């Protein structure tokens, strides 16, 4: 199986091959967990929801149709829907305790997925969690998953231009909220320049 391409693995998985689905799980579980963790702020809920994402994907993999977007976009959409239901059902918005950090799987670590490391950044995460859901999703995909605007657009079912515009508006809104913050602890420099400043 070592010589299998991603396309062949996906094709085998859609035919019901459990080993191929296991390979997809190994490839994407860490990223999906990381995304869910930053959306929920709870390692326990992130583990539970990640399991549910892959259980749902496994149940529906034989009806998966390639529509020209990466397979990962399908997984992120499942994750997004489950997280939205989680927020709706639990009516809770926990602040992410970033001291716990990302818990990588035993088989593989994703050091690039650790976004926040300082108290200053924890304060910034608090502001992010107060944003509307789609803006949280955008920032988490961009900064914990390191995705391009085009990749985020595939997941959020929007054009690259629409994502760039949403990103621009989101950063402006964050800057305004931070400007109003009396503590003045931090700035948005880590987010880089706004799209029209690039």
Image (cartoon, rainbow, N blue to C red):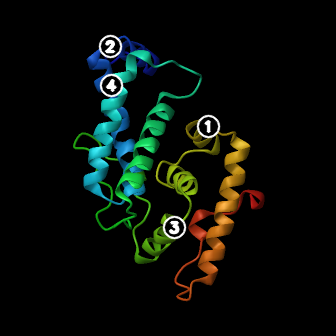
| In the depicted structure, whether residue 159 falls above or below residue 69 | below
Horizontal side, residue 159 vs residue 71: left or right: right
Label 4 belongs to which residue?
58
Residue 59 image label? none
Expressed as whole percent of the image width and height from the top left, the position of residue 104 reads 29, 48
Q: Nearer the viewer, residue 120 or 182?
A: 182
The answer to the question of whether label 1 and label 2 lie on touching residues, with beta carbons closer than 8 A, is no
Q: Nearer the viewer, residue 147 or 109?
A: 147
Which element is circle 3 on?
loop
Name the residue: 36% across, 33% down: 27
**How many tags in the picture?**
4
- Tell me the quadrant of the picture where the C terminus can be found: bottom right
Horizontal side, residue 25 vs residue 69: left or right: left
Mark 2 surroundings within 10 Å by alpha-carbon count, few (fewer than 14), some (14 through 19), many (20 or more):
some
Disc 3 from disc 4: Cα separation: 33 Å
Residue 16 image label? 2
Name the residue: 40% across, 73% down: 118
Residue that lies at the very extreme toward the top in this rendered image: 15
Residue 130 image label? 3
Expressed as whole percent of the image width and height from the top left, the position of residue 162 reads 71, 46
* Image quadrant where residue 168 sits: bottom right
Residue 157 image label? 1
Dot 4 or dot 1, earlier in sequence: 4
| In the depicted structure, whether residue 54 falls above or below residue 12 | below
Which element is circle 2 on?
loop
Mark 4 surroundings within 10 Å by alpha-carbon count, few (fewer than 14), some (14 through 19), many (20 or more):
some
């Amino acid at each position: 199986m070592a010589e299998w391409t991603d396309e062949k693995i996906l094709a085998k998985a859609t035919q019901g091959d459990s080993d191929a689905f296991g390979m997809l799980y190994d490839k994407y579980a860490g990223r999906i967990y990381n995304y869910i963790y930053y959306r929920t702020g709870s390692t326990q809920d992130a583990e539970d929801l990640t399991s549910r994402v892959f259980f749902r994907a496994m149940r529906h993999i034989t009806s998966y149709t390639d529509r020209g977007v990466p397979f990962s976009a399908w997984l992120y959409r499942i994750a997004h829907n489950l997280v939205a239901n989680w927020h709706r059902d639990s009516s809770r918005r926990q602040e992410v305790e970033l001291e716990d950090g990302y818990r990588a799987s035993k088989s593989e670590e994703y050091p690039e997925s650790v976004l926040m490391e300082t108290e200053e950044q924890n304060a910034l995460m608090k502001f992010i969690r107060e944003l509307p859901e789609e803006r949280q999703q955008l920032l988490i995909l961009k900064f914990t998953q390191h995705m391009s605007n085009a990749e985020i657009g595939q997941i959020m079912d929007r054009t690259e231009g629409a994502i760039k515009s949403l990103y621009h508006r989101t950063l402006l809104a964050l800057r305004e909220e931070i400007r109003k913050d009396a503590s003045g602890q931090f700035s948005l420099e880590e987010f880089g320049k706004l799209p029209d400043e690039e």
